[in-house]
Amino acid sequence: MCDINININSEVELVQEHGCFSSNISSWSRKLVGKCATHSCAEGYKCVLKGEGITCEIAYCIGRPCAANAELNEPFGLSRGLGYGMMYKCTNRTQLTGKPFAVCRKTGKWKSMFICGEGLLVSQFKKTGQSTFYNCSGFLQCQPKGGVDGIKEPENMFHTLPEPEPFWWVNLGQVYKILKVVSTNRIDCCGDRLSKMLIHVGENLDTSHLELCGQFMGPAASGQVIVTLCNTLPEGQIVKLTSVNAVPRSFHLAEVEVYGVECFV
């Protein structure tokens, strides 16, 4: 039996294989699916009989994987089946980072394992927030926006209250595939307050639904520049930095620079 899961207007021409034939599923009789003929499932799901009942289960990935500056390198086009890995190649002689595959995961979500290009700074002047707010006195700037304003000066930073796990975040405004995060520690003093830092990427602030980019193990020094490479190339529009402490401590960085590639899905 031959099986293919693509649209008729796929960007790759269908290759005719000996012993196989193709048919437009929209022309099939609905009677072939029995009880499911009158049951509708959302895109990406299929109708399944369970005992006397009917349910919808994840069947394939919808949309396209994050593959900016790349093109599909498969003779039979894009397969959306769960567990399938699709090969890509970079265009315009851009550099490949990672493995040139995009996988349809069992969750029904695409996971690209590569980036084509070096990535651009995508965090500057974007919306920010933090777990708590420290009321700085005098000339110090301690607001969340201090982490993405491009100013790396002793009096400029974001600053939380002392907490066991204070955090700061930036909303990139759209989904990016993240290559690295460059963090500049507080410059004027107190750099050793940063002993362990976790960086997560995703679509909301719930860490259980975020993917780990990487971590830093300190203690850090004042003004230290920390480069965290995201080896798994996570995708998302929220980048969350968390300081993990044995005792409550403030979290303060002078600047956070997120580098990524825009996802065209």
Image (cartoon, rainbow, N blue to C red):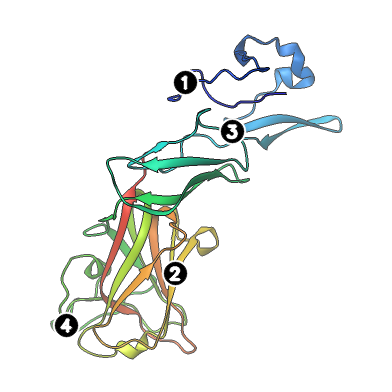
Horizontal side of residue 181 vs 88, given as left or right: left
Residue 109 % position (x, y): 54, 44
Q: Residue furthest right?
A: 51
Nearer to us of marks 3 and 1 is 1
Q: Which residue is mark 1?
A: 13
Task: Please name the residue that numbered disc 2 is placed on.
Answer: 214
Residue for badge 4: 154
When the figure is inspected, residue 242 is found, relative to residue 237, above or below; the finding is below
Please tell me whether mark 2 sits on a helix, a strand or a loop.
Answer: strand
| Farthest-out residue, front | 18
Taking the spot 50% from the left edge, 29% from the top edge, the residue there is 75
Q: Amino acid at mark 1?
A: Glu
Q: Residue at image x 16%, y 82%? A: 154
Of discs 4 and 3, which sits in the foreground? 3
Sequence-earlier tag: 1 or 4: 1
- C-alpha span from label 1 to label 2: 40 Å
